[in-house]
Amino acid sequence: MTTHQCHWEPNARAALVEQLRAGDHRYDLIVVGGGITGAGIYHEAAAKGLKVLLIEQKDFAWGTSSRSSKMVHGGLRYLASGQFGLARDAVRERQALLNELPGLVEPLPFMMGHYKGGFPGPWVFDKVLAIYDWMAGKRFRQFLKKGLRDFWLPGLRSDQLLGATRFADAVTDDARLVMRVLHAGNQSGGHAINYLKALSPLVQEGSVVGLRLHDEMSGAQFEVAANVVVSATGAWTDALRSELGQNQVIRPLRGSHLVVAQWRLPVSFSVSFLHPDDKRPVFAFPWEGVTVIGTTDLDHQDHLSEEASISVEEVDYLLRAVNQQFPDAALCSDDVISTWSGVRPVVSKNPNQTPDLKQKAKPSDEKREHAIWEDQGMLSVAGGKLTTYRLIAQEVLERAAAMSNCQWPEADWSSLSVFSEASAESCLASKQRMIGRYGEGSVHVDRLCLEELDGQKLDAFVASTQTRWAELAYACCYESIVHLDDLLLRRTRLGLLLPLGGRDLERGIKRICQHYLSWDEAHWQNEWSRYQEIITRHYALPGALETSCEARKTA
């Protein structure tokens, strides 16, 4: 592996932290937050030749960026509210990501059924989608009336069904997208370190000049200087800003999802429909060989230091919606393989002024646009869409370059970054998937596919998933694995795709970790116990729902 990735190899993280602690380092830019927004800023700045450090208090993509709805949406929501500029930007960015990262960002057709008396009707929806297609430069929309239940949407509710509209968007593995962007920043000379927390800004003569940091692994605290500090911490934005005396601006909203086997709800599209209770959009879509049902939208009142978890009410809400739209499926809690919940960092319309949630706007009415604040020379950014992360990054860097304490080289911050693997259309599907997910690292995945551990070939797929054992080995070697959940919930998604987080595969996973991470028996047992607790508390059904379908039917 080339030198630019050495600080992500086993044991190299500790050495880099010690260098930061002992040395007299000053960075052009420190980025706080290892989600998609922070990763985008890191990549763009490093590509322009700046000396950049990115720090993340947990693991890369630990927050919203591994627990989103996986959609690379265009701007359909923006069109509905008349925000044509934002819609145009989102559509163009979606198309750019589809072109640059095939195998990671993939087309996903959407289908929306139209029912008599329902909104929007086929005619109105077609006119909105006409603008959408015009912005994309290609017609995708199609109204379908025949063969819906027999071919397009088996099991769809047919009562008063007028037809369905097909249109285009895209889907990704959000955590792997973050890793691709971070790798690109590493290749340009940046340093990205997980489990390194920003405790407070360092202020001199009224301006932020660096950060005081805490290393979760060693317990060490130390200071690092920078010309500019950017906080891209999402739902945690208020924490650093409060250190500078600023008021709360973020309204954390939780969105939860259910994962079921694809044979229990076989959909080939993302099927969008309105919940029968509150008319909110809900969807079911195919992802990584399973079917995902989402999402909810409600105030998240638990402490942000804990991973978000689905509630009993949210499970019932999602099952009620999908069973109303697909009545033949009769899904129940027994069908749920896993769950995940993410916290959206929504910039509230009325921050700090209405502590009573009943007085606030409905969660679904809050705007999703990003916002940028400057506080004593520290920039903070929150909100926005995964799709437009690069545009947000460029805007942040333009603001940073204009600040008085910034002495950066002249650069065109408006130019889009382009991944080197801009086209893999001629590859086999399996090869395209590897290139999309790992970029230049796919060469090392291929090499690892030739290896065996105790007779287990690493090119074999893990259980029923599309993930190979070699991908786990690659992550252990080159992607800063500190804890087992880093490997199974974010570098790969096995914890979401397999029952009980992959508990039945303990032996094979242990073999990988002990060989490539040099974990001894005690270390492995601690990590396995920790991982099982995380799965039980945050990625499984709530305890009150752990009943069988038959018990629920007869209750």
Image (cartoon, rainbow, N blue to C red):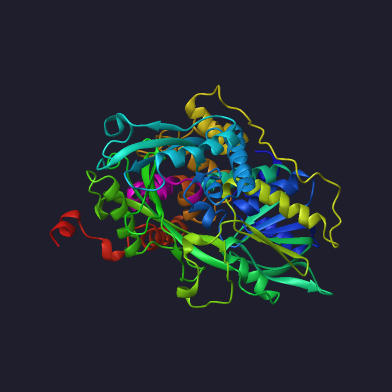
**Viewer-closest of 84 and 318:** 84
Residue 457 shows in this picture: yes
For the point 52% across and 78% down, which residue is it?
355
Reply above or below: 75 against 522.
above
Most frequent secondary structure within the magenta stretch:
helix
Q: Quadrant of the C terminus?
A: bottom left
For the point 52% across and 36% down, which residue is it?
130
Reply above or below: 376 against 461.
below
In magenta stretch: residue 510? yes
From the top left corner, tell me how far across and down residue 440 is, in percent: 62, 34
Locate residue 232 relative to residue 294 in the image: left or right.
Answer: right
Reply above or below: 90 against 154.
below
Q: Quadrant of the N terminus?
A: top right
Q: Residue furthest left?
A: 554
From the top left corner, tell me how far across and down residue 42 is, in percent: 69, 51
**Viewer-closest of 118 and 520:** 118
For the point 31% across and 49% down, which residue is it?
322
In magenta stretch: residue 115? no
Quarter-wise, where is residue 287 in the image?
A: top left
Q: Please give the range of residues in magenta.
A: 490-511
